[in-house]
């Protein structure tokens, strides 16, 4: 079985927190397009409501793999429920996404609890709740003040992380971010351009850990591992849900965030209150339904199929929805 087929099989073997949901999926190459799963049997199937066709919803996302996949999952699920859906899945940073949402250029997009609390609502990172439900609840009043509503979070959480090649970590004796004290001035850190202004990125490493680097190199998010592999950076801001941390676990090391400056966040689907009211009760039901199987392991596999196997996010999202029995 090649790596792509293996990932499709793994996707069909995921489990949720409340229900073990397994599907065998390792047939002949001729069967590769078969997503498997019986939505009618497991009761997960999203039912199309013709009354929803008059509601047009533009789903957005930020500009990296995980967001592309999530945006597709939500968009395709809402379309299955009968809504007229458009997509704008490469908005940029969280500030751009929020501005697009508030200006009505999009109607909804996936955001992380930790990002919302620290970047939008200026909560110090050490005060961000570790409990996903509490973090979600902390954001509700602030979102409401902006005319927005956030829906309950996904099972998986993701955080920014300081990563490096394992051989570099071993050579320098690095295990925690605090261990960088005294050596960071000789190291190049790579991160997305907005990392400079984010408290859960370069800004937090400077303010809370007191670290200064030889140089900060802004890079496209898609190059966060390549800069390490090619020696263009010693450290890189990674995501804890990255496929490479699962598929190449021995190659890369994540430094422990021993001061809690890079809080983990679960995903909330944030929407304009106006569109929520117009869309009716099917909207919330669909959003919460399609998130149920998004565990950390599943999200890493979905990311791997795009970043490692070079599949299209739309196709990966569709396979996830079929495997879960959400669509036929």
Image: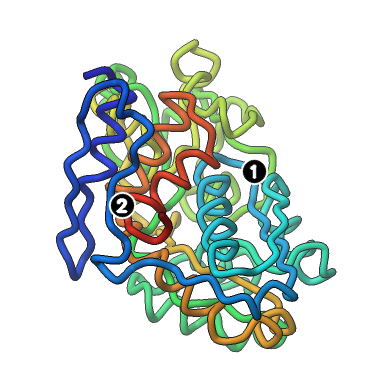
Instruction: Judge by depth and name the residue closer to the eye, 233 or 223.
Output: 223
Q: Secondary structure at mark 2?
A: helix
Q: Is residue 129 above or below residue 34?
A: below
At x 15% / y 60%, what residue is drawn? 20
Q: Earlier in the sequence, mark 2 or mark 1?
A: 1
At x 51% / y 68%, what residue is drawn? 268
Residue 168, given in percent of the width and then of the height, sits at 33, 19
Residue 63's disc is 1
Q: Secondary structure at mark 1?
A: loop
Residue 296's disc is 2
**On the rendered structure, is 125 left or right of 102?**
left
**On the rendered structure, is 201 left or right of 245?**
right
**On the rendered structure, is 15 left or right of 150?**
left
Instruction: Judge by depth and name the residue closer to the eye, 92 or 81.
Output: 81
Q: Quadrant of residue 38?
A: bottom left
**On the rendered structure, is 75 left or right of 4?**
right
């Amino acid at each position: 079985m090649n790596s792509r087929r293996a990932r499709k099989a793994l996707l069909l073997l995921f489990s949720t927190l409340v229900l073990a949901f397994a599907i065998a999926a390792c047939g002949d190459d001729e069967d590769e397009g078969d997503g498997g799963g019986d939505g009618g049997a497991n009761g997960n199937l999203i039912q199309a409501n013709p009354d929803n066709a008059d509601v047009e919803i533009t789903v957005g996302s930020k500009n990296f793999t995980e967001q592309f996949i999530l945006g597709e999952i939500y968009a395709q699920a809402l379309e299955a429920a009968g809504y007229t859906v458009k997509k704008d899945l490469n908005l940029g940073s969280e500030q751009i996404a929020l501005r697009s949402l508030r200006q009505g250029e999009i109607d909804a997009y996936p955001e992380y609890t930790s990002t919302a609390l620290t970047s939008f609502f200026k909560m110090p990172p050490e005060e961000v709740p570790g409990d996903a439900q509490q973090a979600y609840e902390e954001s509700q009043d602030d979102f409401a003040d902006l005319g927005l509503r956030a829906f309950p979070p996904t099972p998986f959480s993701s955080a920014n992380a300081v990563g490096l090649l394992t051989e570099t970590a071993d050579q320098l004796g690095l295990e925690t971010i605090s261990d960088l004290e005294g050596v960071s001035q000789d190291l190049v850190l790579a991160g997305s351009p907005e990392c400079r202004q984010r408290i859960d990125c370069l800004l937090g490493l400077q303010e809370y850990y007191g670290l200064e680097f030889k140089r900060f190199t802004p890079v496209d998010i898609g190059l966060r591992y390549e800069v390490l592999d090619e020696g263009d950076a010693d450290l890189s801001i990674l995501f804890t849900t990255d496929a490479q941390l699962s598929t190449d676990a021995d190659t890369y090391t994540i430094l422990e965030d021993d001061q809690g400056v890079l809080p983990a966040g679960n995903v909330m689907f944030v929407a304009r209150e106006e569109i929520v009211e117009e869309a009716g009760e099917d909207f919330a039901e669909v959003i919460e339904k399609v998130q149920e199987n998004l565990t950390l392991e599943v999200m890493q596999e979905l990311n791997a199929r795009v970043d490692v196997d070079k599949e299209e996010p739309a196709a990966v999202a569709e396979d996830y929805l079929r495997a879960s029995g959400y669509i036929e």
